[in-house]
Structures are given as structure tokens and as C-alpha cells.
């Protein structure tokens, strides 16, 4: 079915929805916590929800988005080749991979329609104001891909001064950033380059962000924003094929990957209109994403293009009732520019209706949400969610969530299936999840302990059957696998004025069942234990020292070639920041004790590295 037929098929439901909006003549409410489409205060949010503020981001001077998020409970990553600029996907709690985490920028999803996941390397941390992390099944609220939860990056739009920043570091790392602000207009630009520790791991990125806000009337406004990123990164090897790791080959590129490069171009445009009447609001969002990937290689010159566009509208009545509709068109294409062959060209439309009801009593808050998604020939489904928060006292809070969720197949999965002449009965990967948690603190809020127990299951997962000469040829594709994960996460915070402590711990057990005839076994890249200790020391009013200690347990799993293993590791980082008038300088050391370790098997991470930077506000 082509995109024209999909548009015609969805026209009837669009007309009905718009008539409902016009007849109602009511308005909805913009969210304070954008990822949840909710304006509930923090004390009424489920335990485990993370909001990383600007002040908390500022502690991680010179570090990437990945380094910051990796410091919190319930978050881990996939990073294939290990160095700056390589594809980095977020894995929340015990999810199997990054395809089950929905990544958004100001509420705009950026997950790939072809592969399913989203790489966060293109997000420049200097342009981020706040990060929201909501763990657990969220398809009832956010739709496709939010099986494990969602991460929402709120970009800077309300800076009161201009600024410029320069960073330098090990292995030729350089970054230049500038930010200009005038009333209602924000413009940011960053240029980053890195020569790389491993051969053919160099990286270059140019990133632009612009936003504009304008009041139309006393009760309505409009916001526009545009993000552009162009990056070129060396690809030193296939991310899952073992390489020699004996100290002599660790800096070499894999055979055949000595000169491989990829270029990624990403553009995101979004416009939001809001119209307020009392405590009600009409919200309308239009969006378009355009992603390109180019293989810059002599023997392989594939060109991937993804286009996603559509709109979302919702009506909110106070903080208690919300109705919404979203229409999204996805198109993807892969061409080989050497042979001129088009490998695939797919399109689909997804119509979504959702509703959410929140009940707030003096100490109790409950939310019931439900969403219906229809992707035509690619399947349809209903996702419910129920959550409850009970504030027993000023010092004790309980919360619980249970929900079902789904993820549409990526176009790459569909292409792989059809290229083998297969037709699948199931169209979605389906899952459910639940959690129970408590949070306790002392009377002055200086000491806080929270703990959340979770369980999650995903079924109808796509499994690829390869020959013994993996990774090619591909023999078969089926939706037969399933996973389940369970564990708990805890966070202990202690504020001693000049000393602020934070201890984050995650235990998770992820098992996978390859097909109906096999048994559950431990999945790859799923450490049981992860411990992060953050210590913020305010030496003087203008001098700060920040220490991060990370410990990850060993990882073992089995595959058709035998046992695989990634050793446990412990890494310590330190950053010192000094403020002088309008200047701010920092110096940081990552991996102080020069630990030799790997995140992906046989792709070692660089040892001790240094960074320094200077920021000037004017």
C-alpha cells in the first residue's frame, strides 16, 4: 500500500476528530512534564521518575549525554564501537535493547522507523536544559516503542544571556559552542571534532538549534523549533564481531574496516500552538523528521533516507481529563548509489486515539490511560495503563504501575522478512510491565531513600536465523522470541550542604527465550549489578569538585559459538569547576586509574583521558 492510499484510508477518521474538536470548543493544558503529557507536581509522580535539572547537568562538565544518563539508576546503553560519535542507544531497566526506549526532543519522538531505536550522540548537551526519564511501559501515553519507557530532552529556550564555550581534550578532542538569545528567539551552534583513540574512530559533528516563541493573543501562543545535525564518524569494525584484545591489536581497526566512514544528517522541525481558556487548553503540534545515513565507502555506498511527519492534537480539562489524536506518516528508502539498486521503499500511516483520566485526592493520585493505534496492514493494538501514587505522610510515598505496550516492526525487519519470502501473522512486538516502589525521607528532606521493584515481558520479538558464517547469509526471519526481566533499582541521597551524596544501584536479570522449543537463558550485555556513586563538593562559593564512581558487574551469555564474556569494571572520574565573574573554567579526568575495560565485547574503551574548557557569558 503506497502513501497516497494510506492518506485516503485515514482521511475519514481525521475529519471525525477535527469535527469533535470544533464542536467542543474547549481547550487543553500544556504539560510541565512533557514526556507524560502531565502537569502533576513531583510528589505525585511515580517513584523512579527522573528529572535531571540544569544545575545537575552542569556538574558533568565536558561529558556527553551518555555519560550523564549512565549515572542514574535503571539506565544502561548499547555502544558498538565504544568511542565518541558511535551509535549509542538507551536501554531502560531490563529491556533487551534500545528499540524499546522512546527518545524525544521536546516531546517529538526521534526513533528510527527503519531500525526502531534512537541514537542520542547527535544531541549536544550544551543545548539541553532538562532531561526527563520515565521508566516502565508507556505506550498508553506515548504510543509506539515505549515498551521500556521514555527519555525526553528539553532544549534551552529561556536563557537570559549569550555565551560561548571552548573545550579541548585527549586524542584531539575539540569543541566550540556559541549561544545567542534575544527576546523570544534562541540560537545555538556547536562544532565538535575528535581524532580517536582507535584507528578509524575519528568524529566530526556540526549541530544547530533554533527556537522561536510568540504570543498570538492573551490566551494563545506559538512555538517553533528546528534542529540540524551533520556528523561523520569512522567505523572501525562490526559492533558484534569479536576482535583480538591482547594489548597488541586493541587500537587496530577490524579487517576491511580500516577506512569505513558513515555520515549522518538529522533534521527535526516542530511547531506547537496552544490556546488557553481558564484551566483548559487546545494543543496542536505539527512535526517532521528527516534522517539520512550515507556509507562513505568505496565498495559500499548505501544511502538511507527516513521521513516522518504528521500532527498531534489534544484537549485537556484542568489536570484531570485528556483526549488526544495523532496521525503519523513514516517513509523509508534504501539505495545503493554504486549499483543504482533500490533495496527497499516502504511507507505507512499510524492513526492513534488516546485518553487519560487522573483522579487527585488529598493524599492519593491515580491515572488511567488507554491508547488505540492503527498502522493499517502493519497491525493495530490497544494499550492500557494504570498507575497510583499514595502519599502516606510528608515522609513516605508509595507508587505502583501496570501497563501493556507495543512496538511496530522496523522497516529493516520487514525488508529482511520479505526478502526471504516470509509473511508474519504478528505485526507488533508486544509487552507488559509493572512496578512497585516506595520513597522515604527525613523531615528536612536532607536524606532520601527510594526503591522500585519491576518486572517486564516482551513477546513476538523478531529473530534472525544466520548461517555458521555469521553475519551472512541470512537464512530465515521469524517472530518467535520473547524476553522477561525483573529486578530493582534504588537511590540514596544525602545533602550535607557543602557535600551532596547520591548512590544509585540497579539489579536486573534479563532472560531470553529464542523460540518455543528453547529454554530461557541469560541475554547478552545485561549486567546483573550496576552501582554509581556521585559526590558533589562545594569547596568554596565559586569552586566545585565533582566525583563519579561507576562499578559494573561481569556479563556472561551463550550463543551458537559458545560462551561470551565482558569482565566487570570500575571507573572513577573527577571534575573541578571554577567560576570567576562571567567566566567558568573546568578541568576533568575520566578513568583516573586507567582501568582497562570494555562495554562491547572485544572493543576496549580508551584509558585515562583529560578534558578542559572555558565558558564566557556576555
Image (cartoon, rainbow, N blue to C red):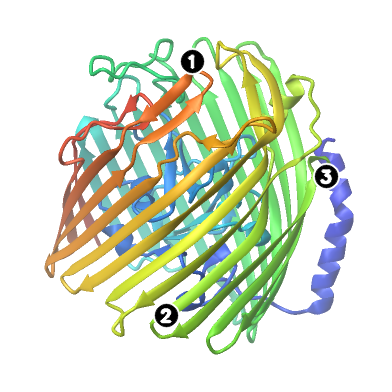
Residue mark closest to the camera, 1 vs 3: 3
Residue position for label 3:
376
Question: Is 375 located above or below residue 345 in the figure?
Answer: below
Q: CA distance from mark 1 to mark 3?
A: 37 Å
Q: Tell me which numbered mark, 2 or 1, is placed earlier along the sequence.
A: 1
Q: CA distance from mark 2 to mark 3?
A: 46 Å
Q: Residue furthest bottom?
A: 362
**Residue 310 visible here:** yes
User: For the N terminus, which image quadrant?
Assistant: top right
Give the camera-side residue of 229 and 415.
415
Q: Secondary structure at mark 1?
A: loop
At horizontal 54% and vertical 62% (from top left) the residue drawn is 435
Percent x, y for residue 488?
44, 57
Can you identify the residue that label 1 sits on?
Answer: 297
Give 230 or 449, whichever is nearer the viewer.
Answer: 449
Quadrant position of the C terminus in the picture: bottom left
Percent x, y for residue 85?
Answer: 39, 35
Q: Quadrant of residue 198?
A: top left
Residue 579 position (above or below residue 360): above
> Which of the marked residues, 2 or 3, is nearer the chain's N terminus?
3
Residue 437, above or below 142: below
Mark 3 neighbour density, 10 Å: few (under 14) some (14–19) many (20 or more): some
Looking at the image, which residue is at 54% across and 53% down?
Answer: 104
In the picture of the structure, the residue carrying the numbered disc 2 is 396
How much space separates mark 2 and mark 1, taking CA atoms?
A: 58 Å
Amino acid at each position: 500500500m503506497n502513501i497516497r492510499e494510506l492518506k485516503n484510508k485515514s482521511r475519514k477518521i481525521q475529519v471525525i476528530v477535527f469535527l469533535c474538536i470544533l464542536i467542543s470548543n474547549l481547550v487543553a493544558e500544556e504539560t510541565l512534564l512533557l514526556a507524560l503529557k502531565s502537569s502533576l507536581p513531583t510528589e505525585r509522580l511515580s517513584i523512579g521518575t527522573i528529572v535531571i535539572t540544569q544545575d545537575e547537568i552542569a556538574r558533568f562538565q565536558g561529558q556527553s549525554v551518555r555519560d550523564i544518563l549512565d549515572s542514574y539508576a535503571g539506565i544502561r546503553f548499547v555502544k558498538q564501537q565504544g568511542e565518541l560519535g558511535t551509535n549509542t542507544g538507551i536501554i531502560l531497566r531490563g529491556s533487551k535493547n534500545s528499540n524499546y526506549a522512546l527518545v524525544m526532543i521536546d516531546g517529538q519522538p526521534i526513533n528510527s522507523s527503519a531500525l526502531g531505536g534512537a541514537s542520542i550522540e547527535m544531541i549536544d548537551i550544551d543545548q539541553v536544559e532538562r532531561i526527563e526519564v520515565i521508566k516502565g511501559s508507556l505506550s498508553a501515553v506515548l504510543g509506539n516503542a515505549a515498551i521500556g519507557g521514555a527519555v525526553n530532552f528539553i532544549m534551552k529556550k529561556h536563557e537570559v544571556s549569550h555565551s560561548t564555550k571552548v573545550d579541548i581534550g585527549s586524542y584531539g578532542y575539540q569543541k566550540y559552542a556559541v549561544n545567542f538569545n534575544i527576546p523570544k528567539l534562541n540560537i545555538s551552534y556547536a562544532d565538535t571534532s575528535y581524532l580517536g583513540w582507535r584507528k578509524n574512530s575519528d568524529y566530526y559533528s556540526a549541530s544547530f538549534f533554533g527556537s522561536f516563541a510568540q504570543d498570538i493573543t492573551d490566551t494563545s501562543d506559538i512555538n517553533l523549533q528546528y534542529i540540524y545535525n551533520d556528523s561523520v564518524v569512522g567505523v572501525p569494525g562490526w559492533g558484534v564481531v569479536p576482535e583480538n584484545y591482547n594489548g597488541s591489536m586493541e587500537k587496530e581497526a577490524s579487517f576491511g574496516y580500516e577506512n569505513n566512514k558513515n555520515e549522518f544528517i538529522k533534521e527535526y522541525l516542530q511547531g506547537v500552538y496552544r490556546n488557553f481558556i481558564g484551566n483548559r487548553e487546545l494543543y496542536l503540534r505539527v512535526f517532521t523528521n528527516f534522517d539520512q545515513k550515507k556509507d562513505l565507502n568505496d565498495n559500499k555506498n548505501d544511502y538511507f533516507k527516513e521521513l516522518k511527519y504528521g500532527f498531534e492534537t489534544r484537549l485537556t480539562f484542568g489536570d484531570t481529563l485528556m483526549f488526544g489524536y495523532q496521525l503519523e506518516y513514516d517513509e523509508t528508502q534504501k539505495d545503493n548509489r554504486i549499483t543504482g539498486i533500490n533495496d527497499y521503499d516502504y511507507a505507512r500511516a499510524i492513526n492513534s486515539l488516546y485518553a487519560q483520566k487522573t483522579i487527585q485526592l488529598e493524599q492519593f493520585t491515580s491515572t488511567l490511560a488507554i491508547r488505540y493505534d492503527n498502522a493499517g496492514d502493519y497491525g493495530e493494538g490497544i494499550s492500557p495503563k494504570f498507575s497510583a501514587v499514595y502519599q502516606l505522610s510528608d515522609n513516605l510515598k508509595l507508587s505502583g504501575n501496570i501497563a501493556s505496550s507495543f512496538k511496530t516492526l522496523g522497516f529493516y525487519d520487514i525488508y529482511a522478512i520479505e526478502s526471504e519470502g516470509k509473511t508474519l501473522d504478528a505485526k507488533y512486538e508486544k509487552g507488559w510491565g509493572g512496578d512497585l516502589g516506595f520513597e522515604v525521607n527525613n523531615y528536612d528532606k536532607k536524606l532520601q531513600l527510594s526503591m522500585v521493584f519491576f518486572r517486564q515481558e516482551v513477546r513476538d520479538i523478531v529473530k534472525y536465523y544466520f548461517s555458521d558464517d555469521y553475519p551472512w547469509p541470512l537464512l530465515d526471519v521469524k517472530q518467535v522470541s520473547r524476553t522477561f526481566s525483573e529486578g530493582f533499582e534504588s537511590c540514596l541521597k544525602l545533602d550535607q550542604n557543602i557535600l551532596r551524596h547520591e548512590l544509585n544501584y540497579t539489579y536486573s536479570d534479563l532472560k531470553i527465550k529464542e523460540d518455543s522449543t528453547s529454554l530461557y537463558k541469560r541475554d547478552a550485555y545485561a549486567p546483573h549489578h550496576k552501582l554509581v556513586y556521585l559526590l558533589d563538593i562545594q569547596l568554596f562559593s565559586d569552586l566545585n569538585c565533582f566525583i563519579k564512581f561507576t562499578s559494573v558487574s561481569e556479563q556472561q551469555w551463550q550463543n551458537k559459538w559458545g560462551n561470551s564474556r565482558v569482565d566487570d569494571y570500575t571507573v572513577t572520574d573527577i571534575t573541578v569547576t571554577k567560576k570567576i565573574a562571567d567566566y567558568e573554567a573546568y578541568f576533568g579526568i575520566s578513568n583516573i586509574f586507567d582501568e582497562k575495560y570494555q562495554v562491547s565485547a572485544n572493543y576496549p574503551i580508551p584509558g585515562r583521558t583529560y578534558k578542559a574548557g572555558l565558558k564566557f557569558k556576555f
